[in-house]
Image (cartoon, helix red, strand yellow):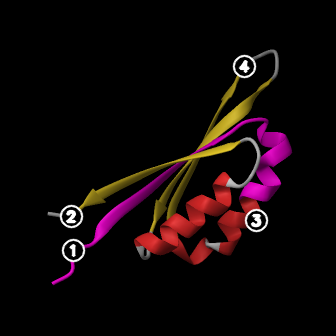
């Protein structure tokens, strides 16, 4: 029996207004693999915070997840962190 995994991707986007279109294109490309998506950014009275974080719960193979993360990491201003949790 194959154990499944929770694949979580943390995406840090600098200058999100500048880079968000490229990130969205990758998210759309892998849309069938995205179970949950949560976007976080700070807002203050003076102006919007230029950076943001997107958390993704990914479904599919770990190879597909790595392809997804690699495409995101190729975008200037984007940093990706991978988290893998094995089911017990």
Q: Is residue 14 magenta?
A: yes
Q: Which residue is mark 1?
A: 3
Marks 3 and 4 sit apart, C-alpha to C-alpha, by 28 Å
Question: Separation of disc 2 and disc 4 at Cα?
Answer: 39 Å
Q: List x then y, in percent, for residue 76.
A: 77, 46
Quadrant where the image shows the N terminus: bottom left
Upstream in sequence: badge 1 or badge 3: 1
Q: Secondary structure at mark 3?
A: helix
**Whole-Å distance between the Cαs marked 1 and 4?**
44 Å
Give percent across and percent down for residue 30: 61, 72
Nearest to N terminus: mark 2 or mark 4: 4
N-terminal of the two: label 3 or label 4?
3
Name the front one of labels 3 and 4: 3
Q: Which residue is mark 2?
A: 87
The residue beneath circle 4 is 44
Mark in the foreground, 2 or 4? 2
Q: Are marks 1 and 2 in contact (CB under 8 Å)?
A: yes
- Looking at the rendering, the stretch of residues picked out in magenta corresponds to 1-23
Q: Is residue 88 above or below residue 1?
A: above
Of badges 1 and 4, the one in the foreground is 1
- Marks 1 and 3 sit apart, C-alpha to C-alpha, by 31 Å
Q: Which mark is residue 25?
A: 3
- Residue ID at (46%, 73%): 63
């Amino acid at each position: 029996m194959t154990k499944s995994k929770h694949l979580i991707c943390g995406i840090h986007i600098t200058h999100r207004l500048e880079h968000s279109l490229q990130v969205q294109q990758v998210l759309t490309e892998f849309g069938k693999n995205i179970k949950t998506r949560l976007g976080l950014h700070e807002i203050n009275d003076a102006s919007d915070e230029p950076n943001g974080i997107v958390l993704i719960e990914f479904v599919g193979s770990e190879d597909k997840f790595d392809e997804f993360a690699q495409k995101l990491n190729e975008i200037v201003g984007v940093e990706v962190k991978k988290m893998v949790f094995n089911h017990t």
